[in-house]
Each structure stands twice: as C-alpha cells, then as structure tokens.
Image (tube, grey):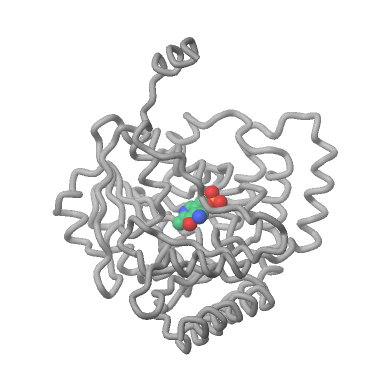
Amino acid sequence: DVKLQAVLSSLAQPAKDLEAQSPGQRAPDARYVKLNTNENPFPLPTMVWRSAISALERQYLYPEDDNIGLREAAADAYGLSKDHVIAGNGSSELLGLIYRAFLGPGDSVAMMSPGFSFNRKLAVLQSAKFLEVSWSDSHSIPIDQLLFGPAKDAKFILLANPNNPTGTFAPIADIERLVAQSERLVVLDEAYVDFAPDNGLRLVRRHPNLLLLRTLSKSYAAAGIRVGFGLGHPEVIGRLRNIQNVFNMNVIAHAVGVSILAHRAAYEDNHRHIKHERERVTAALHQFGFCVAPSHTNFLLARVPNGQDGRWWQAALERDGILVAVFTDDGLDHCIRISIGTTAQMDSFLAAVAAISERLK
Ligand code: PMP
C-alpha cells in the first residue's frame, strides 16, 4: 500500500534497529510448565484477593490522583515519606521514566553486564549510549571502572541486585561504597531482593544519589497486576513524577498494592518454599552435570553439560512441555535460566532433565 508506506516513512522511528522484543515466550496451553519469566505461581493471600474484588466497585471512577494512597502505603512499609515514593505500572514503567527523564540524545548510561536486557532497548529509544561494564569473576562490583573508566561520564549507573540473569548478590556494603564515591545517580533495581540475605533500603535516606526500584511481580506473586515502586530523594522522585502519565495505574492495582504491603508477613511461606526449592533444584542439576551459580533470587542460571548450546536444551525441554529462558547476546550461550515454581513444577522440570540426559548418553 503506497499511502501506508508514505505514512510509515514520515514517522519518526527511534528504535528502527531494534527487533520487537518479547519478554518471554507465552505458554501455548495451560499444560506447559512456564519457568521462563520468573513469575511466582502461588495464589494471592485471601485478604489480598478480597481487596481486588472490592476494588471493582470503584470501576466507574478514575483511580486516585497521583497514586497517593498507594504511595503512602509504600512509604509506611519502607519507613519513608510519600515524597520519597513513586508508584509505577510495574517497575518496567519506572525504568522507562528514568531513561526518559534523565537521558538526552548522545548521553550515556552505564550498566553492569550481563544484566536485565530491557535496559538496552530503553537506552536506544533515547538515542543514548549504553555502556556495559562486566561483573568481576567473583561477581563483585568493579567500582573503579564505573567511576574512572569509559563509564565515568554516564548520566546514571544501573545495576540489579540480586542480578538478573545471573542470580548473584553483591554485598550492600559494596553498593554503598559505589553510591558514596559516585557523583552520579545510581539506580539499584531490587526486583528480586526478597529472596536475598540483605537489601539496600537503609541507604535511601543516607544517599541522595540512590534510586531504589522494587516490584510486587516476583516475591509478591502479582506480576499480572503491575505494581512497582521507586524509592529515592524527593527531588529525584519529583522529576520522575513530573513526566508520568496521569492515571497510570488502575483501581485494582491500587487496592492489591496496598493490601500486599499490609500483608507482607503472609508471604513468608512462599519465600521459604522458593528458597528451599531453589537449593533442591540446584543440587539436582549438579548431579546431572550442570554448573549452577548460587542464586539469591527465584531463578537459577545453569550452564548446561558438555559445552552444549543453551538453545538446544531450551528446545528439548519445550518438547517435554517445559519453558525456560536463554540469553544469546550476553556471552551466556551455554546457559539456561529456570524460574523456581511449585514443587510439582520443579519435579516435572527435573524429570524432563533426567529424560533428556538419558537420551544424550
Ligand atoms: N528488573 C528486573 C531485574 C527484572 O528482572 C524485571 C522483570 N523481569 C523487572 C525489573 C520488571 O519487572 P516488573 O515490570 O514486573 O516490575
């Protein structure tokens, strides 16, 4: 169609070099065991469920302006004021705001690599440079490289702790040294922190250049509800809130968010289960010849045996009804990433691994 082509070519296309990126394959049907996007398969606590239902009575009203009630609930839960908090439609929305608010064309952002690949796309959308700095072999933060290497002029430094896709955890003391020594904004993405031994919340009041991200998608089993928080200095948070869409979250997300924050203790069993399964599956994978880094998240990054390609294992597992993730552009070609689900799901995964290993003999 000639007119369509003319219209399309008249439009700006900042991301023309990017392929449409899918965060992970959908399960073709409900029989598949979906272990590819780090969801938490347990039901919401009953009280949280009820709050979602009663929020439907407010369906004809626009949601609360500026997410006030949800921000107050988060401020309460995290020991901050509501001016320290921005609420987002998942932490992905907040990542998008950070790139839009703080990066112009030609600016650069520094990120620890391997890391959460969505960030690369966000930098491209801003016509910004994306500087990847590798984790050291011991998975510690190369502070000097971030402060004095090619990344020294980056507008902000972004790292996830625990990190995705490696599952590794850097001590909070190291994070604090980086934040204290850096003159720049440090964005610390703590999407998986409830599965880790420590967290960076106490640093928020101490360091005005720290911006912390949290989500209810992983440890609070609410990926489909879309609730995330940014916690930081009110001036930094204010700049993000300035450019956010009005009514960015819906009434159900507000109600569920407030209720989850009030019932965090109800998730203790959930977190205990995931950590327990994580250790069980790690040990079992070692028996099959996989190399698994100790994980502090709800997933495992496993190097497959005998130098095989991760994609081969992904395809073999899919034929057995199991979905896992692979990372082809981060030097992780020989790895698969497996989310931790229910005991039954992990048994199905391990049975498939056993069958595939047997066939390979
Ligand atoms: N940060 C990291 C490190 C993640 O792995 C994810 C989800 N894969 C997110 C942020 C985004 O999560 P959400 O938008 O669901 O809050």
Q: Residue at x 39, y 42 (%)?
A: 121
Quadrant hosting residue 133:
bottom left
Residue 80 seen in the current view: no
Q: Residue at x 40, y 70 (%)?
A: 168
Quadrant hosting residue 308:
bottom left
| Position of residue 60 measured from the top left corner of the image (x, y, whole percent) | 81, 29
Looking at the image, which is closer to me, 63 or 314? 314
Looking at the image, which is closer to me, 63 or 17? 17
Q: How many marks are shown on the rendered structure?
A: 0
Q: Residue at x 35, y 64 (%)?
A: 333
Residue 50 seen in the current view: yes
Q: Residue furthest bottom?
A: 287
| Position of residue 21 measured from the top left corner of the image (x, y, whole percent) | 46, 44
346 above or below 217? below
Relative placement, left or right, of 91 versus 29 is left
Looking at the image, which is closer to me, 309 or 79? 309
| Position of residue 287 measured from the top left corner of the image (x, y, whole percent) | 47, 89
| Position of residue 360 measured from the top left corner of the image (x, y, whole percent) | 46, 81
Looking at the image, which is closer to me, 225 or 259? 225
Q: Residue at x 27, y 75 (%)?
A: 138
